[in-house]
Image (cartoon, grey):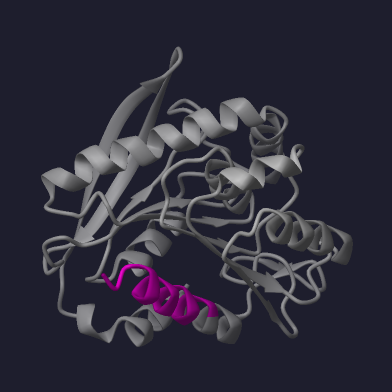
Amino acid sequence: MIKFLALSAFLFAGSINAKILSKDVRYKVGETFYKSTIVYSDKVQKSAPLIVMVPNWKGMTEESLKKAKLVAGDKYIVMMADMYGEDVRPKNNNEAKKASSAMKSNIPKLRRVMNKSVDILKEEGKKLNGDDNKIAAIGFCFGGSAVLESARSGKDLKAVVTFHGNLLTPNLEDAKNIKGKILVLHGAIDPVVPKKELESFEKEMNNANVDWQLVSFSGAVHSFTNPTANREGASKYHPLVTKRSFIMMDNFFDEVFKN
């Protein structure tokens, strides 16, 4: 974790002296209550862009909260989105797999929960003087699936960024609903997202005339931004690729939100 905190200081040096504030927000989707967390700097500017961040399959963890703060820096208002409900907090990989698989097997529900989180951040972001016309979503692993499905549903997102995320969807035609720009940050030797999945995604995006980019990082496997990932050849933290990917995300947002 020390390396990850050092990366935070490196990427967003301007926010070193800033205080990161946080606020939990509770809301309902169907019969289930969800509790997400909004983070922002006390130095964040008025009209700051709003970013929904969907964590990996373990959901609302302290590690993901640190990542949300890293993303926020002093430029963005970020909401770490609860995708499972406030009573579901996976304690291990088996519980995380069960929770994430349940969501991925029910795409309509996944989209409803994801899209509600976008709406909540718009509401809360306005209270913090953020710009609800500048909203994006980012996701890690399972979170990558969630943010892409929100885009495919036609949600008004200016940009979507996935980090080592899953790219498959049951209905490729839904890509025609995508309104924003897409950036996929991918480990070039990720065994979880094989070449066939990449090819299917590329065809899907091209057929729908989406403005998209895919960056493959040499030497990176799955979970390259996760400091606790340590399965050689499968899912492993890669500090250099993490640094590069966060810089690319930030540059991408600078382009999308320039006006």
Specify whether 225 is left or right of 255.
Answer: right
Indicate the quadrant where residue 207 lies.
bottom right
Asked if residue 170 is positioned above or below residue 21 in the image, the reply reads above
| Residue with the most extreme top position | 31
**Residue 155 at what x, y percent from top left?**
46, 41
In this rendering, position of residue 144 left or right of residue 4: right
**Which residue is found at the position 58% from the left and 32% from the top?**
110
What residue sits 64% from the left and 59% below the top? 209
User: Residue drawn 26% across and 70% down?
Assistant: 259
Whether residue 57 is visible: no
Query: Residue sitting at 24 percent across and 70 percent down?
Result: 75
Specify the segment rendered in magenta. 245-259
**Of residues 157 and 24, the one drawn nearer to the viewer in this rendering:** 157
**Which of 37/121 is in front?**
121
Residue 157 pos. (x, y %): 42, 50
Coordinates of residue 197 in the picture (x, y in percent): 82, 58
The main secondary structure of the magenta stretch is helix
Left or right placement of residue 127 versus residue 195 in this view: left
Residue 251 highlighted magenta (yes or no): yes
Q: Is residue 104 visible?
A: yes
In this view, the residue in front, 13 or 147, is 147
Q: Does 97 sit above or below residue 197?
A: above
